[in-house]
Image (cartoon, grey):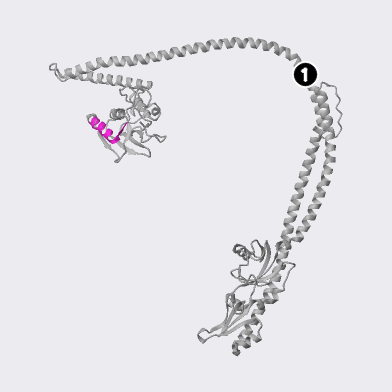
Amino acid sequence: MYKRSIRKKVIIVIFLVSLTVMAIGVGLGYFFSFKILHNMVGDVHRKLSQLLANNVSEDIDAEIERIKSYTARQTQPDEILKEDKNIVKADILTEARKKDGVDIGGLEFDETANAWVIPISSGNYRIEIATAKFFDFLENFRIDDTGHAVIVDAQGNVIFHPGASWTNAPFTDKNDYERLLRNKGQYGTIYEPKFHKGKMFVAFSEVTSPALLENNTVWRVFIDEDAREVFAPLNKIIIWVIAAVLLLIIIMDVIAYLFSTILVRPIEKLYEAAVRIMKGDWDYKIDIKTGDEIEHFADAFKEMIANVRGKQEELLMSKSALEELSQSLEKKVQERTKDCTNAQNELTNYARELERALMIKSDFISMASHELRTPLTAIKEGIALVLEGQTGAITERQKEFLSMSKRNVDRLARLINDILDIQKLEQGKMVLKMEPHDINEVVSDVANIMVAVAAEKGLKLSVKPEAGLPKVKFDKDKITQVLTNLLNNAVKFTQKGEIQITTARGSNFVQVSVRDTGQGIKEEEMPKLFQKFSQLEGGLERKTGGSGLGLTISKAIIDKHRGKIWAESRVDKGSVFHFILPITERRGLEIG
């Protein structure tokens, strides 16, 4: 099987290479032979068409001279018909229709004469020449069995055709005709002739009669012949060439078989040696003398067998050592597996304890925050009553300390509220009340509350809403909380200037922006903006109070609305915080 396979491959390769080379040779030979024959026949046909065109031109000029003589002599129509066999009708025109010079008209069919005619006017004479009689010398013109001559006008319509059955019909398809006229050699193949089945090879020349040129009339003499007949000699040659190629292929196959036998014999010996060695006959002698690469391969094979035999002995010695090592490793793996299992159990227990501790911490923070709210509320009300003087008159010094206490109690209350909000958000317990609202109304309500706070620091607070914003579904209280946080931060970090709130509509969202003229945020601190308990330094390294949870809570609220919040800032230039709320869900569904 091995031997037959190698021989078959060699034969197939040589066969394919030979066939490819010969096919390319035959193809190129046919192509160039076709071009040579095409150009040679085209040149001969064109010269013949030129001779015929010259004859037609001479006949037209002679006929025109006869007609001029009739006009000069005022010959009667019946006498003209007797003198000139080409003329089938002669009329004398009135003075009103008299024409100067000679006028050659287009092809017409005279029903009286039952013939196709060409009208010629000279003076007051109008004469009709029968094309069948005038071009009768073309009737007997033949080339081979299918070649003949045709006269065609500028539009491609037949003026004369042997047998007259195609007169005034298109010579060929319009595209074929225009392509022929563009050919500088004035010959080529037409693929859709109107008077013949199959392709036709044609050549043409123009009739250069002065009478036709003066009337801007174009006639062309075409010689056409069946393309199969034109290229029949080439096809016969190709048949003989193909037969010769087939004979050469048979010879090449025989050579390939002999060559493959010479090539395969040493490979058979190598194959036999490999089989014997595989069966354990390590002493089998390999004797191949070819003086080429196969002999080198046989020598390398013998050397490889010697090396393999030595390696086999080494492997047998190593086998017992590996078996002992394998048993030792198996014991160590079992010990390590047991250790890993114990460690995994310890990590699992630690994770459970850590989760339990986090839950206890969260519950403790929530409980502590709730428990602190009640006394703080009482303290706030007590301080407020004292400040309002309902418990008696107080001094300015007492009022100052009470006001300070009230600010700290308010700050502590905000801190507790922030902690409770962040706990709800983290535990997923915050429920949004989604209803349609006008964002401009919410912005206006918050601004009206914060305008007094801004005025205390001498800051101007303005609102520039975009008119016609659609209503958006959101939790009004939570968005109010976000706006309040952003405005509180803007007031807190702005020493002079103004704060501006703007609204705008995007492609599928509404956007709210809070801009201040504060001292800005350093670029390296921007990533920490929305982190929990984060206190940032201002442009002048100033510190401000706060829980550090306001922006974190704002981001969580906006995220829960499936919106986005971000900030832009430059030191000493101020900051602007943006957030957007989708008009509809990004998956195409309304939020709510």
Looking at the rendered image, the quarter that the C terminus falls into is top left
Looking at the rendered image, the quarter that the N terminus falls into is top right
Label 1 residue SS: helix
State the residue at coordinates (78%, 55%). 239
The kind of residue on which mark 1 rests is Gln
Magenta residue check for 450: yes
- Residue 530 in the image: state x and y as whole percent: 37, 26
Q: Is residue 560 left or right of residue 82?
A: left
When asked about the image quadrant of residue 304, the answer is top right
Which portion, as a residue range, is magenta?
Answer: 435-451
The correct choice, above or below, for 405 with respect to 289 in the image is: above
Q: Name the residue under label 1.
A: 312
Residue 397 visible in the current orientation: no
Q: In this view, does 98 lie to the left or right of 295?
A: left
Magenta stretch mostly in which secondary structure?
helix
When asked about the image quadrant of residue 437, the answer is top left
- Residue 183 in the image: state x and y as whole percent: 64, 64
Magenta residue check for 396: no
